[in-house]
Amino acid sequence: MTGAGAASGDANGSGGTPALIEVCGLKKHFPINKGLFGRSTGTVYAVDGVSFHIDHGETLGLVGESGCGKSTVGRTLLKLMEPTAGRIVLRGEDITGHDQGQMLPYRRQMQMIYQDPYASLNPRMSAGEIVGEPMAIHRAASGGERRDRVAALFRRVGLRPELMGSYPHEFSGGQRQRIGIARALALSPELVVGDEPVSALDVSIQAQIINLLMDLQDELKLSYLFIAHDLAVVEHLSHRVAVMYLGRIVELTDKTSLFDMPLHPYTEALLSAVPIPKYTARSRKRVILKGDVPSPINPPKGCHFHERCLYAHARCREEAPVLREVLPGHVAACHLHDGGVKLPLAKPASV
C-alpha cells in the first residue's frame, strides 16, 4: 500500500469500520507578500500533503520538532484555517469546501484545547461564562439549564462549581487548562484536538491533566488528535503516533511499533534524544543529526530530510519518498525500505 491510502487506511479504522475523520493529501501554504501592492515573493509550505485517519475513541499522537506544521494540521483539520488542497472527511461527509455558515453544525462535533491556558481564556469573562459561551453561541442551553450544565462540567474536570464566578487570573495554570477542557466539552464533541495542551504546565500538573484526558476519553468515548513534542507524553496517551518533519508525515504506526522499531531515520533520531526510562542507553544508540531544520519557504528537493540523514543516498536528493506500508499497519516515507531494509541500519551511506 502506498501514498495517501497507506496513511489513512482507506478511510477505514480498526475492524474495517469507517473512521470518525479522514484527512487525504492535506496542504496548507501561506503566501509571503511584500511591498505596497502585496506582491507575492514566496510561499511557506507549512503542511505539504498530509494523510491520516482517526477512529472513534482513538487518540492519534502527532509529534515533531517546532515549526514542522503540527499545529497548522490541527487548525486546518478543524477548518479554523482553510486548506490549500486536500480533503477532510468527517463521518463520511466531505467538509473541505464548507464555508463558515455550513461549518457551524460541525463545530459542535469538533473542538480544540489550546496550548496556553491563560492566553486562550478571555480575561474579561468569568470561568462560568467562558465554559457556557459555546452553549450560548449554538443555542444549546440557556438560563438555569446552562448554569447547571456548566456546574456539571466543572465537577467533571475536577473544579468546584463555586469557582464559576471567578476570573482566569484567579486560577493556577492547571486550573485554567481544566477550564479550557470544560469549554471544549461544552457541546459534547466527538473529536477534540489538543494543541500541546500540557507543554506549558509543570510536570506534576501535566500528569494530572493527561490522566483527566484519558478518563474523559473512556467516559465520553472521545477521539483525540494530540499534538505534542514530548514523546514520553505521547507514548502514555496515544494509540497510534504520526511523526512529522517539515510539513510531511514521515512515519505512522501504533505506539508500540514506533518505539520498539522506528522505520524512518528521523524517528530514530527523535527517540534517541528523549530520555524514556524503559529504553536504556544500552538498548538505544544516540543519533546526532547534522545541520538545522531547513526553511519551509525553500524545502529541499526530494526527501525533505536528506540533508540531515545519516543514510541518505543519491535517490533521496532527487525523488520524494511516498508513505508506504513497510510492515502491517506500519507506514514510512523512506527510500531505504524499497529493498526491505529496516532500522536501525548497520552502516550509514555516504551522502
Image (cartoon, rainbow, N blue to C red):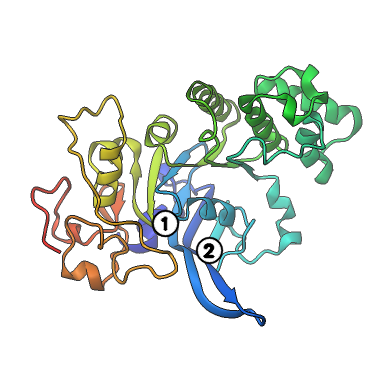
Residue sitting at x 72%, y 35%: 186
Residue sitting at x 42%, y 59%: 247
Dot 2: within a 10 Å radius of its alpha carbon, few (fewer than 14), some, or many (20 or more) residues?
Answer: many
Residue at the front extreme of this rendering: 35
Residue that badge 1 annotates = 10
* Quadrant of the frame with the N terminus: bottom left
Q: Is residue 214 left or right of residue 288?
A: right
Q: Is residue 14 left or right of residue 43?
A: left
Residue 83, x across and y down, in percent: 57, 64
Secondary element under disc 1, as helix, strand or loop, is helix
Secondary element under disc 2, as helix, strand or loop, is strand
Between residue 9 and residue 245, name the one nearer to us. 245
Q: CA distance from mark 1 to mark 2?
A: 13 Å
- Give the quarter of the image for residue 112: top right
Q: Is residue 314 left or right of residue 273?
A: left
- Give the quarter of the image for residue 254: top left
Residue 51, x across and y down, in percent: 43, 58
Q: Is residue 351 left or right of residue 221?
A: left
Residue sitting at x 86%, y 28%: 145
Dot 1: within a 10 Å radius of its alpha carbon, few (fewer than 14), some, or many (20 or more) residues?
Answer: some
Residue 44, x across and y down, in percent: 49, 67
Q: Amino acid at mark 1?
A: Asp
Residue 288, x across and y down, in percent: 22, 46
Number of the label disc, if any, that sits on residue 87: 2
Q: Amino acid at mark 2?
A: Arg
